[in-house]
Amino acid sequence: MTGHMSGRLRPDRLELGEGIRWTGDGVVLVDILAGRLFTTADDPALPLREILRLPVPLGAVAPVAGRPGTWIAAAGTGICLLAPDATPTWLATPEDRPGPALRMNDGVADPAGRFWAGSMAYDTTEGAGSLYRVDHDGTVVRVLDGITVPNGPAFTADGRTLYLADSARGVVRRYPVDPATGTLGAPEDFLTLEDGSPDGMTVDTEGALWCAVWGTGTVRRHLPDGTPDRVVRLPARQPAGVCLEGSLLHITTARVGLEAPGPYDGAVFTVPVEVPGTPTPAFRPAPWARVAGGVA
């Protein structure tokens, strides 16, 4: 099924809108390079509301269970907790190291309450990126390396499957996950694109994968066996992030890198869909963990 974008359009235009998530209480998203975290207004005619701003890039956040207003964030060169006043408590800064300049990119919590986030080189140096997992005790573990531009990650509802895009290579891989430990098994190539780059992703209640395809103006739904199912076409060239708020598909786009951005490049779109999604999980720190008190 192919359909053109219909629905609501907000007035904002972001440079690099990504990391859009439905928390159950509201929708949040980031403008990565500007370091800004926003929430959407209930009225789609109103602008986005800035929650906080960092002096470093902000790739994505997840709420922290039991701590309203606190976020775990993929930001700068690592992972931090963000207090309601935006004060960061750094858990680790693994990309503050020699070599090409690196920054954190997309990230999400899994159903078990761990946080996962990828990193990339600013100049997209081949293979410079990694995928990190933050365990309940706040330990940050590098679980994959050799990735160029990791995007996603996205999990199935049972937490047993991880989808991860390497946008620069045009591939989405699927990994088995042990929910008890967060250990990844051997990957399989789920989707390889000849046009555009796979970017932000989310999984709906039927286990199908929605993927924003950068450079094509499309968001695509693939069934769990990989079969293409639906394409949403947007009047913006660089779709970057997707989330499902129930049966509303929210899509972020980007203006960055475009010599002559069009009127809708960088906009946030909302499209009704048939199959809903569920709220993004929260990061769940162990009660005894150092992160539980917000002190690194």
Image: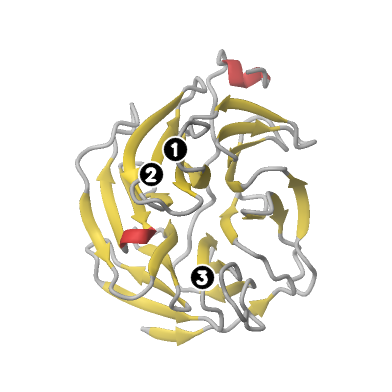
- The residue labelled by disc 2 is 128
Which sits in the foreground, 91 or 154? 91
Sooner in the amino-acid sequence: mark 1 or mark 2: 1
Residue 220 in picture, x, y percent from top left: 39, 72
- Whole-angstrom CA distance, mark 2 to mark 3, is 23 Å
Q: Tell us which disc is closer to us: 1 or 3.
A: 1
Residue 95 in picture, x, y percent from top left: 49, 34
- The residue labelled by disc 1 is 99
Q: Identity of the amino acid at label 3?
A: Pro
Mark 3 Cα-neighbour bin, 10 Å: few <14, some 14–19, many ≥20? many
Do the residues bearing badges 1 and 2 touch, measured as CB atoms within 8 Å?
A: yes
Q: Identity of the amino acid at label 1?
A: Gly
The answer to whether 58 appears left or right of 52 in the picture is: left
The mark found on residue 239 in the picture is: 3
Q: Is residue 17 visible?
A: yes
Sooner in the amino-acid sequence: mark 1 or mark 3: 1
Residue 159 in picture, x, y percent from top left: 36, 41
Q: Identity of the amino acid at label 2?
A: Ala
Residue 18 in picture, x, y percent from top left: 57, 58
Which sits in the foreground, 126 or 111? 126
